[in-house]
Image: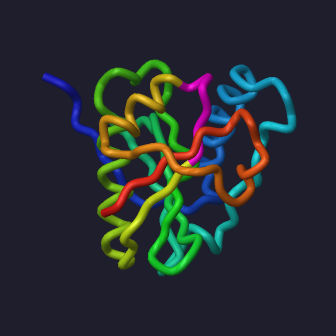
Amino acid sequence: MPEPVEIAPAPLTSPTAQALIAALDADLAARYPDPADVHPALSVAEVTGDSGVFLVATVAGEPVGCGALRQIAPGTGEIKRMYVAPSHRGRGLGNKLLAELERHARRLGLSELVLETGAAQPEALGLYRRAGFTGIPRFGAYRDSPASICLGKSL
């Protein structure tokens, strides 16, 4: 029987959040060694209150994943910082995190979600496409980034 997963908001500045983000950054640095492919970090204000949320997934009390949602325009939110520890991949945690982020987006009154990923993240591309995201033009900080693949979804 699979262990239960708990997904809950967490402060972006918490040690747990910072450890998960550091693991994500290390994973991305290995996949994208060009520093030009690094994009701006989240701010606390972007993922609190009515602006967004930062979520942490735990299994048996161990933090194993995270994801964030920030509002970038009226009605539009951006999914950021999605990560599942390699030891817990293939268990549906990404689906659960994404579904919870979508629930928060609806709570915030958002009607569209967008995100950026890249070709070196085939598991992420598969997750998002299975969840109904489709290709959109590159946007914002990703507009001039050839390594970026942007996706969107209406809620």
Instruction: Kindly identify the residue that appears in the image at 34 percent across and 50 percent down.
Output: 7
Out of 29 and 58, give the one closest to the viewer.
Answer: 29
The quadrant in which residue 4 appears is: top left
Q: In the displayed image of the protein, which residue is found farthest to the front?
A: 137
In the picture, the quarter occupied by the N terminus is: top left
119 in magenta? yes
Q: Residue furthest right?
A: 35
Q: Quarter of the image holding residue 108?
A: bottom left
| Residue 120 falls within the magenta-colored stretch | yes
Magenta range is 116-121
Q: How is the image coloured?
A: rainbow
Quadrant location of the C terminus in the rendered image:
bottom left
Position of residue 25 measured from the top left corner of the image (x, y, whole percent):
70, 35
Numbered-mark total: 0
Q: Residue at x 50, y 61 (%)?
A: 69
Q: Residue at x 61, y 70 (%)?
A: 46
Residue at the image point whose x is 62% and y is 23% from the top:
120
Q: Above or below — where is 17 with respect to 111?
A: above
- 43 over 73 or under it: above or below: above
Quadrant in the rendering for residue 113: bottom left
Image position of 119 (left or right of 74): right
Percent across and percent down for residue 8 are: 37, 56
Left/right of residue 145 with respect to residue 78 in the rendered view: right
